[in-house]
Image: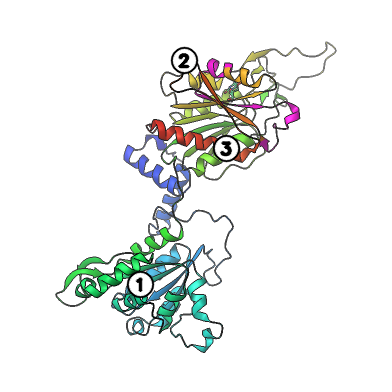
Amino acid sequence: MASLTIRKLDEGVKTYLRLRSAKNRRSVEEEVRVILRELIEGREEPLTPFAAPPAASPAPPSPRTGAVAEASVTLIIGGGIAAYKSLDLIRRLKERRVDVRCVLTKAAQQFVTPLAASALSHERVYTDLFDPQSEFDAGHIRLARDCDLIVVAPATADLMAKMACGHADDLASAILLATNRKILLAPAMNPLMWNNAATRRNVAQLQRDGVVMIGPNAGEMAEAGEAGVGRMSEAIEIAVAAERLLRPPVPRPLAGKRVLITAGPTHEPIDPVRYIANRSSGKQGFAIAAAAQAAGAEVILVSGPVDLNDPDGVTVKHVESARQMLEHVQASLPVDIAIFAAAVADWRVANEGEQKLKKTSAGMPPLQLVENPDILATISKLSDKRPPLVIGFAAETEHLIDNAKAKLARKGCDWIVANDVSPATGVMGGDRNTVHLLSRKSGGEDGEIAVDSWPVMTKEQVATELIAHVVKSVADKSLEPAS
Ligand code: C5P
């Protein structure tokens, strides 16, 4: 099977993939897989930038469709020729994992039938305020409140006038008066009605009341020979607007940035079955990878052997030794930000046994150690492809700040995250960390170092805080994206 190197694609394609994957909270590779799968399955491009991210706590599957609904909409269909588009809107919303309950006004039923709306929504359709079946327990109140959003499409001039004045003489207007949910209107009417002073007043009033509107668009009217502003927005436009209200975009300040992170220990082989290792769990590095991913970055995590699940949406390269780690780090360049959280073994065995070393009467086999490459220093000192922001870690058991300051200078990185790993702190393998962020003072004397000491936090909190500092630095320096 041929393999595809994303970095070798056209600039325009890469930019599109980065933005789309960042928006959908996936790695670029994962996004390419999704695009290919959709293509092969013959699905329509569903996407808006706000494709459903995985739900934090999954909603129960919708009984009819089996799909997991993430939001629900009460869709009020008003009486106008554009009502036929609302049937398509039901489908568009359901594609986006939104449950839809339809309310048809009396006039709407002249254009579409409750049966059609029910078949598409897989739900009962509501038409009457005085329906004993649904009103025995104040059904209009439930329709008004047991949803995340109310959409009115088409919103006729008459419905908008009723809303602006607070009428409640049918099911639709009663729901609109009784709701405490956001309302999205998709007006549709003849251009003269849209431009009429009464409608203008009503539109202005509804906007003051916090009602959101989409459209109307300009174009041909259903009435022969008439054109102007008054056509209802297309179903897909309304669905996208609804989705934006249901799932406001999460801030993604690192969208378009590539972040490289190392994590965990390394294992340096003595022979085929033994190795030298350290107690690093990889938790801090993995938490940083997840935080960078949540901030919208494309994240590459190069991890030594750990007992952790790969973070969602992150490209993870699993390695054993320091030399393999360096190799993968170098292959991942260029990146915008590199964070070296791995506890890389300083030494490896020079005379690694090809077979398992045996006990002999001659005593212990001598183990000769040689120094491993220093990944952080190597990358910090690159003249070409040096990431604009390089962050190292200093795990010390004594003289924490002094040792960390010396490390910042020696390794040539931009920041050092220093933490005390003496056994009494329980940091190695534990869930909490107390760190100090050391950075070169901007505008200060040459070599002056700022020390920012953070309180004891969970490793996730440290990761979030570190990424917040990265975001600020990226914004201040407006780093050019890596290419
Ligand atoms: O020299 P020391 O191991 O204390 O330095 C710690 C920092 O250097 C960490 O950021 C670690 O990931 C990085 N490092 C490295 N390669 C090494 C040793 C340390 O990248 N061989």
Could you give the CA–CA distance between mark 2 and mark 1, rounded to whole angstroms? 64 Å
Residue 107 counted in the magenta span? no
The answer to whether residue 258 is above or below residue 96 is: above
Apparent side of residue 135 relative to residue 158 in the rendered image (left or right): right
Snapshot quadrant of residue 396: top right
**Location of residue 321 in the rendering, given as x and y in whole percent from the top left corner:** 62, 25
Apparent side of residue 227 relative to residue 137 in the rendered image (left or right): left
**Local SS, label 1:** strand
Q: Residue at x 46, y 57 (%)?
A: 247
- Residue that carries the numbered disc 3 in the rendered image: 463
Instruction: Report the magenta residues as a range.
Output: 406-432
**Location of residue 297 in the rendering, given as x and y in whole percent from the top left corner:** 46, 40
- Residue that carries the numbered disc 2 in the rendered image: 446
- Residue that carries the numbered disc 1 in the rendered image: 153
Using a 10 Å C-alpha cutoff, classify the residue at mark 1 as few (fewer than 14 neighbours), some (14 to 19) or many (20 or more).
many
For the residue pair 281 and 454, the one nearer the viewer reads as 454
Using a 10 Å C-alpha cutoff, classify the residue at mark 3 as few (fewer than 14 neighbours), some (14 to 19) or many (20 or more).
many
The single residue placed furthest to the right in the displayed view is 361
- Residue 263's tag is none
